[in-house]
Amino acid sequence: MKKFIYPEMMVHVPVCTSKEANDILIISDNADLLSIEAARHSDANVKVITCTLNEISALEDSAYDVIISEMASDIAFLSHVNRVLRDDGQFVTTHPSLDDVEENKRLMKILGNYFKVIMPYSIGNGATAILSSKEYHPTADINLHRADMIDGLSYYNCDVHPAAFAMGNYIRKEYLGVIKN
């Protein structure tokens, strides 16, 4: 897989779904590539803070518009994510393969306690992430101006954004009632 696809899709999908993406939190052990992509949104006065799982509990309430996580998600972690995310915020997380139906249903049900929209999307090479949104829909509310004005991208664009959410019928059937869109 091209090394640029993953960080572009993890960052630009939630940032371009957000009405205002001023404050971005990246939760990762190695956030270098994600931070580089987030910094491309200089017009939005982006503040990228990278923290570990333990440090999220000390963060201020309602402080972030977008949270991007590469860490395993459990109930306690997602409760903190909900607390530090603004009322119209987006949360993106890596997760097991969509083929691990039971683990993903467990995760999506927990996310359903906090978010109006929960949708898996392609991040390249058959891998997916889950976008969870408190307000905005990732295909209906894409900020086209922001998506089209990002300089220096190798993969992401305003056409790739909604296409990443296309899923086959077998996935839709398997996750019926769990994916919220």
Image (cartoon, rainbow, N blue to C red):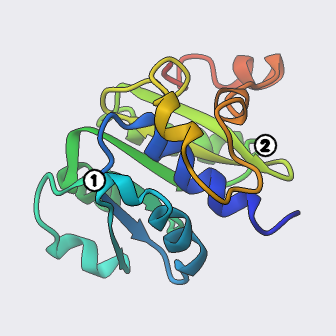
Q: Which mark is residue 22?
A: 1
Helix, strand or loop under label 2: loop
Picture coordinates of residue 35, whole percent (x, y)? 49, 72
Between 44 and 6, the one nearer to me in the picture: 44
**Are the two marked residues, 1 and 2, in contact with CB atoms closer than 8 angstroms?**
no
Picture coordinates of residue 78, whole percent (x, y)? 33, 54
The structure residue drawn at horizontal position 17% and vertical position 57%, both measured from the top left corner, is 63
Between 55 and 122, the one nearer to me in the picture: 122
Mark 1–mark 2 distance (CA, rounded to whole Å): 34 Å
**In the rendered image, the vertical position of residue 78 relative to residue 110, given as above or below:** below
Would you identify the image quadrant in which residue 174 lies? top right
User: The residue under label 2 is which amino acid type?
Assistant: Asp
Can residue 74 be seen by looking at this rendering?
A: no
In the displayed structure, does residue 31 sit left or right of residue 125? left
Q: Quadrant of the N terminus?
A: bottom right
Binning the other alpha carbons within 10 Å of mark 2 as few (below 14), some (14 to 19) or many (20 upward) gives: few
Determine which residue is flagged by label 2: 99
